[in-house]
Structures are given as C-alpha cells and as structure tokens.
Image: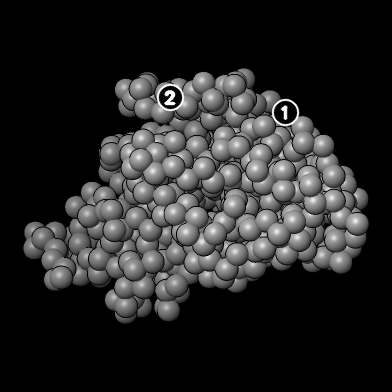
C-alpha cells in the first residue's frame, strides 16, 4: 500500500521535534515492517508503526498527531525489541503523545490523556497512585459511568481495590520532583 | 539474604494478593525483606506517556532510598520492575538525563542500584535446589501456561531478565514445583493491560487471543507476575463471554501464589480469594500432592 502525506504539510515536518523530544533517530529505518507485524494493536488500528516512521521521514506535519495508533499503542515495546536497527518506536510514540497534548488537549477515543493526567494528579497529591479516585473522576470526565459497572459488586466483595487514598509516601520528595520539573518546563528553551 | 523490597502502589490496592503472597513466600524461604520508608510511585504506566523526565525522576527517588539502605532492590510487580530498570539504564548511559533527574530530585543518582525481580532472586540467588528442598507440596503435574507479558522481558537490553521471545524463568520454577511448564507461543504477547480502562474493546480482543491459545495448548491455569496482566486477563473473561459466548474459565494465578501453596503457606495468607476465576481445581491438585 503506498504511503502518502499531504503536500501542504511538507516543509513543516515534525521529524526534528520528534527526535529532540525522544532522542530517537528514526532515519535508520529500513521499512522491514517487523514492528508492524509484531504490533498487537495495529491490526485493529488505522495506522501502523512502520507507516508512522515512513511518514515522519517523508516530512509529515502536525496532522500525524491525529494518528489513532498514538493512543491505541499499549507501550508493549515489541516493535523496539524486534527492530533490526534498534529504533525505540515505543518512545517515538511517547514523544508523539507529548506533542499531541502540547498542541491542545488531545481527546482520542477512550480519552487516555485524561486518565493519564488524573492518575498523575493522584501521585502528585498522595505520592502514590489512588486508582479508585482517578477512575471516578475519569468516569465523570468521559460520562461513562455505565461502563464496567457490572464489575463493581465483585471488586468490592473481593476488596480488589483500595477505597481510601494511599498514605505513607514521602510526599515532600514527590512534590519537589513535580515542582522542579514544572519550573524547568516554564523556562524558555 | 536481605533486600529492600519495593511493593509498588498496586500492593495496596489491585494487587494486594501479589504483595501478600510475595511476602509469605519470602518468609517461608528465609529471604529478608525491608521496605524503604516512604516509598513512592515509580511513575508507571502513565508518567512516561506524559513526561519522560518525570518518569525517570519518580523511579530514581525510590532507587535513592534503596541506595541509602545499602541493599539491592527486590520488586514483585513487573511494571515497577520495568520502570526501575529503564530509569537505571537511561540515567547511567545519558549524562544529560542524569543532570535533569538530579535537578528534579535535588540529589545526584548514578543509576547503579541493582534491581532484581523476585523470581530472579529465587532462581539466581537462592538457587532451584535450595528452593526445591523447602517445598512441602507439589504442583502434581498441573499444566501451567507461564505468561510473562511485556514488562519482564522488553526492551531486552533493559529488562535483561530472560529471553525476550521465549523466556523460561517462570517455567523453571513451575518444573521445580512438579508442574508442567507448557511450551506455548503466547508467553510474551501483550494483553493490552495499559488500555484496560480506556479501550476495553481492544483489550477484550487481545486478552481472548491469549486465553484461547492457552486453552488450546492444554493449560489448566496461567501463571503471571504482572498486576496489570492478572487483573486484565482475570476480569475480562466475563466480557469475552458476553461479547463472543465463549467461556474460558481460566484461572490467572500469580507465580508467588503457586509458590506459596507448594511451600505450605495457608491459603488466606496468599490472597487467593481475590482471584475472580476460581483457582479451586488447581488448588485441589496441589493440596492433594504432598511431597514425601
């Protein structure tokens, strides 16, 4: 299948930014497609790892940040493990996630960015993840209360999730990490 | 043998059973565990998707606590294991990253605290012969599909635990306990665990292919070491039934729970009641196979 990119996007490619954020050089890609053949989700997704790399090489622009794979990627790293050129595609996907978020709140199906933000919020506050708290807010944010509700009786009966927020973490250190990194980010680069 | 044991957030919530059984097995085997005081989240699985430096720093904060204890770090959660190893790898190899982490933490870390998975400690430090001597029960020929998932084996130069395509560590423990470690092709296929809340539609498909392959291979249960794989493969069997009409009834048991049963640890100290698909049949097998 031929890989095409929009002509208008050429010249405003995001190749260099992906490299700057991830530290990964994708120019070595041979298009052998081992990544795509091993990818557990690309069969159910409209984009594949090797296709995203090729598009980056051809000079694709920000439209690439709408690729479905960015948010269906399970971070399993099979792509990287099998790549003969040792390209860490999992980290390239992470860089694309960061860029998609920076462009404006990305809202893909299932809204994984919201879940990520909420879970990180609990770490910043408690020093450890508070999954039930993040899940409740996620369900409110995505209006998906009904989803997985059938599992609630079993989860509660078997006490498979902590009801109260975690305590005991060195919250001072965790807060310092978040604050220091936020400060560095604010500095113009 | 004493290690700084890092429980990880799931130990207090969704993987209490992994935590309890790991502690019980360590106690039975005479492996000393000291918990780093004030341990905090390692940043998995969302920090690396949002901010790479944050994910390195959150892991490094805990590695520094372990450095102060002068011990190796022991981990039972596959996900924490992976994040700690990745942080070590990048901080040791990349001076720029090391500086960023030092600035975030207010303290330098060189990436050299040894991170060990619990099964690695039993196999390498204790040795399978000593482990076998401690057993009171046998798996009695139970056919076990050991399932490693992603995080214990990938990326290979970081995880370094075992062969990334055909790992055998869990199988070696299963064989040592008198079970059959099945040779099956989906040991390291991804179950989609990190998408379980956001894209359960995909997760049902990925999980079913693993369960179907295990069943076709003759498995009586799956042995796992990752909290995300466990809850995902266990809990989604009901969704798979609703979507496809196929019921697998495959128990998804932590390797530490199987070890505990074979070491004669009481059931309630292993958190077996937390498993959704009942492990009764497998447990009956073990309980009736007392070693002479």
- Give how far across and how far down residue B291 sits, in percent: 87, 55
Q: Residue at x 23, y 49 (%)?
A: A66
- Give how far across and how far down residue B121 sits, in percent: 78, 59
- Give how far across and how far down residue B92 sits, in percent: 64, 64
- Give how far across and how far down residue B163 sits, in percent: 60, 71
Image quadrant assignment for residue B212: bottom left
Residue at mark 2: chain: A
Q: Is residue A138 visible?
A: no
Mark closest to the chain's N terminus, 1 or 2: 2
Q: Nearer the viewer, residue A40 or B131?
A: B131
Q: Residue at x 31, y 58 (%)?
A: A42
Image quadrant assignment for residue A122: top right
Q: According to the image, label 2 marks what residue? A: A150
Q: According to the image, label 1 marks what residue? A: A168
Q: Is residue B277 left or right of residue A167?
A: left
Q: Is residue A129 left or right of residue A103?
A: right
Q: Nearer the viewer, residue B220 or B59?
A: B220
Q: Residue furthest left?
A: A7
* Position above or below: B45 against B141: above
**Local crowd size for mark 1, using a 10 Å CA cut-off: few (<14), some (14–19), many (≥20):** few
Q: Nearer the viewer, residue B170 or A79?
A: B170
Image quadrant assignment for residue A148: top left
Q: Nearer the viewer, residue A75 or A126?
A: A75
Q: Is residue A143 visible?
A: yes
Viewer-nearest of labels 1 and 2?
A: 2
Q: CA distance from mark 1 to mark 2?
A: 32 Å
Residue at mark 1: chain: A
Q: Residue at x 59, y 28 (%)?
A: A161
Q: Is residue B122 left or right of residue B78?
A: right
Q: Secondary structure at mark 2?
A: helix
Q: Quadrant of the C terminus of chain B?
A: bottom right
């Amino acid at each position: 299948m031929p890989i095409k990119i929009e002509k208008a996007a050429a010249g405003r490619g995001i190749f260099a930014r992906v490299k700057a954020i991830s530290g990964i050089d994708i120019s070595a890609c041979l298009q052998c497609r081992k990544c795509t053949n091993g990818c557990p989700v690309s069969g159910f997704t409209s984009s594949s790892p090797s296709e995203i790399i090729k598009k980056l090489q051809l000079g694709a622009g920000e439209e690439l940040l709408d690729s479905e794979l960015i948010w269906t990627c399970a971070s399993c790293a099979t792509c990287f493990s099998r790549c003969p050129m040792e390209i860490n595609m999992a980290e390239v996907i992470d860089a694309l996630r960061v860029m998609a978020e920076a462009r404006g709140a990305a809202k893909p199906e299932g809204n994984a960015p919201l879940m990520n933000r909420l879970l990180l919020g609990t770490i910043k506050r408690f020093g450890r993840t508070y999954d039930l708290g993040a899940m409740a807010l996620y369900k409110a944010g995505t209006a998906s209360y009904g989803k997985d509700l059938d599992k609630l009786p079993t989860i509660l009966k078997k006490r498979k999730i902590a009801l109260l927020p975690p305590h005991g973490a060195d919250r001072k250190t965790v807060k310092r990490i978040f604050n220091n990194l936020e400060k560095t980010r604010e500095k113009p680069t | 043998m004493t290690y700084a044991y890092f429980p990880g957030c799931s130990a207090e919530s969704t993987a209490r059973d992994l935590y309890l059984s790991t502690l019980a097995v360590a106690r039975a085997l005479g492996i000393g565990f000291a918990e780093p005081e004030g341990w905090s989240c390692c940043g998995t699985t969302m920090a690396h998707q949002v901010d790479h430096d944050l994910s390195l720093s959150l892991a490094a904060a805990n590695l520094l606590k372990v450095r102060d204890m002068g011990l190796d770090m022991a981990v039972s959660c596959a996900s924490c294991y992976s994040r700690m190893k990745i942080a070590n790898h990048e901080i040791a190899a990349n001076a720029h990253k090391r500086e960023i982490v030092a600035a975030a933490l207010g303290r330098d870390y060189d990436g050299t605290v040894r991170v060990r998975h619990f099964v690695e400690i039993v196999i390498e430090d204790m040795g399978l012969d000593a482990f076998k001597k401690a057993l009171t029960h046998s798996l009695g020929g139970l056919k076990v599909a050991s399932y490693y998932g992603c995080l214990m084996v990938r990326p290979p130069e970081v995880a370094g635990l075992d062969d990334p395509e055909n790992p055998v560590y869990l199988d070696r423990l299963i064989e040592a306990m008198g079970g059959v470690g099945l040779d099956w092709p989906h040991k390291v296929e991804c179950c989609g665990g990190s998408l379980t809340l956001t894209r359960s539609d995909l997760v049902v498909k990925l999980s079913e292919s693993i369960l179907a392959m295990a069943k076709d291979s003759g498995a009586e249960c799956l042995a796992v070491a990752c909290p995300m794989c466990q809850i995902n493969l266990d809990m989604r069997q009901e969704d798979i039934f609703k979507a496809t009409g196929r019921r697998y009834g495959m128990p998804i048991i932590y390797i530490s729970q199987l070890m505990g049963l074979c070491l004669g640890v009481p059931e309630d100290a292993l958190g077996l009641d937390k498993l959704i698909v009942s492990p009764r049949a497998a447990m009956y097998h073990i309980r009736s196979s007392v070693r002479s």
